[in-house]
Image: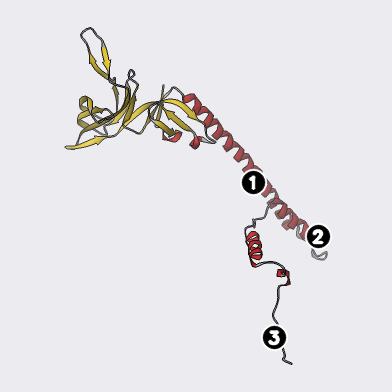
Amino acid sequence: MSSVSGTTDFDYSSIGKTEAYINAQEAANASKDQTLGQEDFLMLLTTQLECQDPTQPVDNSQMVSQMSQLSMVESLSSISEDMSGVVNSVNSSAALNASSLVGRSVLVDTNEGFFDGLNPIYAKIDAGEGTSDITIQIKDANGTVVGEYGADSGMDVMDFSFDGVKSVAEDGTVTYHDSGMYTIEATGYQDGKKVSLPVSTYATVGSVTLGANYTDTVLNLVGYGNITLGEVEEIAL
């Protein structure tokens, strides 16, 4: 009869459970929230009072300190909930207010403008600290130059508009270019070098898609497509 030189611990709780089941339970336990909430804090404090040594009761200063901590936890929790409500209210209000932009013009960071066949395209050209011999070209969707303008010099942000006029007859009849997208390209000379100047154009807001907050709100620009509210540089009448 052989003797046993040592003992081996055996987990009887694993009887009847597959390895996959045990792994799943361990993963579930590991994923549980390990932070203490207000109820947990209060339970620990109550247990401490119940189990204290009668000959060495809890010090009053410690009791006051722990109660203060409990009150602080409760206050912070309440403030957090209130702030979440305020943030949600502000976001909803901002998104709803965006609906008032329908029909308004907004400035966007693109040199493409939509001409509806009648109303001019308005744009802003950034000439920097000083640019000379400025040339502005208007190109249609095929890249054909349909208009060219010049300025001796300019600085800072300059306003520009393209009226879309193609020709004017002797009797005063005006013929306009076809409606569609047109590109505005501006160049000039700075310190003796020819440079391209940044151009931004105005677009009309056709509709607004409200989102859950400010960043989710989308503006549908006539002829352009969709942009987010955060991409708008300026709002005009």
Q: Give the foreground label among 1 and 3.
A: 3
Q: Quadrant of residue 113?
A: top left
- What kind of residue is marked 3? Gly
Q: Residue at x 29, y 34 (%)?
A: 198
Q: Residues within 10 Å of mark 1 (few under 14, many from 20)?
A: few
* Residue 157 in view of the camera: no
Q: Residue at x 48, y 28 (%)?
A: 208
Q: Is residue 86 left or right of residue 38?
A: left
Real-space CA distance between mark 2 and mark 3, rounded to the nearest whole angstrom? 43 Å
**Residue at image mark 3:** 6
- What kind of residue is marked 1? Leu
Q: Is residue 140 left or right of residue 37?
A: left
- What kind of residue is marked 2? Glu
The image's mark for residue 197 is none
* Residue 37 versus residue 227 in the image, above or below: below
Which residue is at the front of the view, 99 or 124? 99
**Residue at image mark 1:** 76
Which residue is at the front of the view, 143 or 203? 143
**Residue at image mark 2:** 50
Which structural element holds mark 3?
loop
Cβ–Cβ under 8 Å for marks 2 and 1? no
Which residue is at the front of the view, 19 or 217? 19
* Residue 225 in view of the camera: yes
Q: Position of residue 178 (x, y in %)?
A: 30, 21
N-terminal label among 1 and 3: 3
Q: Give the foreground label among 2 and 3.
A: 3
What color scheme is it?
secondary structure
Which structural element holds mark 2?
helix
Q: Residues within 10 Å of mark 2 (few under 14, many from 20)?
A: few
Q: Residue at x 77, y 59 (%)?
A: 47
Q: Quadrant of residue 3?
A: bottom right
Real-space CA distance between mark 1 and mark 3, rounded to the nearest whole angstrom? 55 Å
